[in-house]
Amino acid sequence: MLFSALGVSALLAGNALAAPAPVPDGGVGVRPNDTAPVYHTMTDFDFQSLNLGLNQEWIELDLFNYGVERFSAEEFASAGITAEDISLIQFMANQEVGHATLLTNILSYGGRTPAKQCKYKYDFETVRDFVNFCQRLTRWGESGVYGFLPHLDSRPSAQLLLQSITTEARQQMIFRQLSGAFPMPVYFETGISQSMAWTLLSPYIVECPAENPHIEWQNFPWLSVTNEPSLLVDGYEAAITHNRTSLTEPGRQVTFEWDAPGKTTGYNSSYNTTVGGNVTDLTPQYAAWISQLNVTYTPLNVTGNNTGFTYQPGGVVFNTTDDGVVNGTMFIALTDTDLYVTPYNLSLLNDHILAFGLYQAD
Ligand SMILES: *[C@@H]1O[C@H](CO)[C@@H](O)[C@H](O)[C@H]1NC(C)=O
Ligand SMILES: *[C@@H]1O[C@H](CO)[C@@H](O)[C@H](O)[C@H]1NC(C)=O
Ligand SMILES: *[C@@H]1O[C@H](CO)[C@@H](O)[C@H](O)[C@H]1NC(C)=O
Ligand SMILES: *[C@@H]1O[C@H](CO)[C@@H](O)[C@H](O)[C@H]1NC(C)=O
Ligand SMILES: *[C@@H]1O[C@H](CO)[C@@H](O)[C@H](O)[C@H]1NC(C)=O
Ligand SMILES: *[C@@H]1O[C@H](CO)[C@@H](O)[C@H](O)[C@H]1NC(C)=O
Ligand SMILES: *[C@@H]1O[C@H](CO)[C@@H](O)[C@H](O)[C@H]1NC(C)=O
Ligand SMILES: *[C@@H]1O[C@H](CO)[C@@H](O)[C@H](O)[C@H]1NC(C)=O
Ligand SMILES: *[C@@H]1O[C@H](CO)[C@@H](O)[C@H](O)[C@H]1NC(C)=O
Ligand SMILES: *[C@@H]1O[C@H](CO)[C@@H](O)[C@H](O)[C@H]1NC(C)=O
Ligand SMILES: *[C@@H]1O[C@H](CO)[C@@H](O)[C@H](O)[C@H]1NC(C)=O
């Protein structure tokens, strides 16, 4: 009423009601005369990182659909998962179609052929195992992207990938809830390198179309925690959250078995495992616990050919009460040295890794 009575242009001219949006010094791509964003890869690093991400989106699409089709409503119900929950998983599969479309568009620049969907293998037999596998797979999917996102040459592509991975983060949490776990037991979600993520993903891909670009990241030998606890043992059903007894605690003896390098992995027998480029002795010295903002080392006691143990470390990020550096679904590497790395240079650890795996701390 007031504006139309006075006339908008008369009101605004030379008036303090109009002001340019402030752009403090610095920043990239935030001024009208800055180069307009282009949403494509700029380097091989970008292409290989995003194509790895695309392979991850494709397996998620397959996995969520497969689980929904394989199990009956009764089987889901016996795990505390309702018809509405099943629809949510189905919606997540649809989200993956969108994510795969987005990455395919970004990667197609310059006439390149992005990865197409492959054939996969899974080793779960029950609904509980299915949702538990989903919370593990989305854990490395999410962390695998955080590890490279700020290192991409193409910031516009990073923006789009960021907007997909925040959705994936929600999927990860929901699968923890469907597994009866505490949904988000850490203050910070960790990043891992592309080679770490590829190591965890590759065993589940059986066959890919011939035109899929070769994945240039490394496959480390597989690390198994032979006394790894499971979220499923205590019989907690799907829920928004549960207060439950921690699965592990500092001082716990954690036993390992790991593969020697030179094992075939990935699709079509196209990839071999290798140890880090700086490793000169095949006997690992440390376990590296990768979670939150931290990489924490504990000495490894080697007990045989590719077996050994260590003790779970304590230590916290910020809060001494509930912010332990070991919690949730996290990562462990066996290394030849206790290299000091921080979240932005964590990939420098690659050259010192002898085996890599997951750890279900909580
Ligand atoms: C863009 O505009 C700002 C403010 O007008 C000016 O300071 C800056 O030099 C311009 N940048 C380029 C690349 O033209
Ligand atoms: C993998 O094997 C399948 C079946 O033999 C074949 O169709 C496909 O082209 C192969 N892919 C690659 C990347 O070699
Ligand atoms: C849940 O755990 C929190 C902290 O770990 C505690 O303060 C709270 O009393 C617990 N609540 C219930 C209902 O057990
Ligand atoms: C894997 O290693 C074996 C044995 O060293 C070798 O014969 C094979 O060519 C390698 N395959 C790839 C894909 O590098
Ligand atoms: C790793 O190896 C490279 C050469 O391959 C060498 O330049 C570098 O110093 C080594 N780094 C460490 C930490 O040993
Ligand atoms: C490694 O474990 C064995 C068996 O428990 C023990 O005898 C040995 O002292 C341990 N070595 C180290 C360095 O902790
Ligand atoms: C390790 O392997 C070697 C050769 O395969 C064998 O002689 C040795 O007994 C093994 N050691 C242990 C502790 O299993
Ligand atoms: C974990 O990282 C945080 C942030 O850098 C640091 O404050 C804390 O001391 C680290 N905790 C341990 C146990 O190293
Ligand atoms: C740490 O957590 C405790 C209990 O969970 C809370 O009371 C306290 O305020 C937290 N301290 C900080 C510094 O966040
Ligand atoms: C780990 O997370 C649980 C929630 O699942 C929390 O109750 C516990 O305090 C955390 N442990 C540590 C050591 O921070
Ligand atoms: C990683 O970055 C930290 C600083 O955040 C630095 O102190 C450390 O030396 C770096 N690690 C390597 C292996 O370069």
Image (cartoon, rainbow, N blue to C red):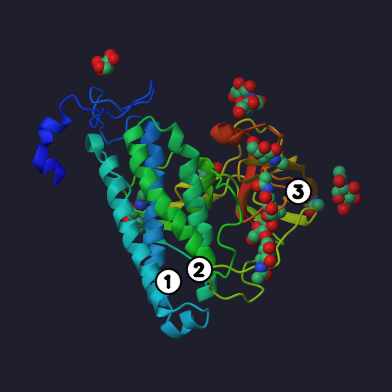
Circle 3 sits on which residue?
314
Residue 312, x across and y down, in percent: 75, 51
Q: Quadrant of ligand 11?
A: top right
Mark 1 vs mark 3: in front: 3
Q: What residue would you read off at disc 2?
A: 131
The answer for how far apart the CA atoms under marks 2 and 3 are is: 29 Å
Residue 317 sits in quarter = top right
Q: Are marks 2 and 1 in contact (CB under 8 Å)?
A: yes
Mark number for residue 26? none
Residue at 26% over, 27% down: 20
Residue drawn at 29 percent across, 30 percent down: 21
Label 3 secondary element: loop
For disc 2, the neighbor class at 10 Å (few under 14, some 14 to 19, many from 20) is many
Secondary structure, mark 1, is helix
Which mark is on residue 67?
Answer: 1
Label 3 Cα crowd, 10 Å radius (few <14 / some 14-19 / many 20+) = few
Closer to the chain start, of discs 2 and 3, is: 2
Quarter of the figure with the C terminus: bottom right
The secondary structure type at the circle numbered 2 is: helix
Instruction: State left or right for residue 78 relative to residue 66.
Output: right
Q: Picture coordinates of residue 136 (x, y %)?
A: 54, 59
Q: Amino acid at mark 1?
A: Gly
* Residue 4 visible within the image: yes
Label 3 CB sits under 8 Å from any ligand 10 atom: yes
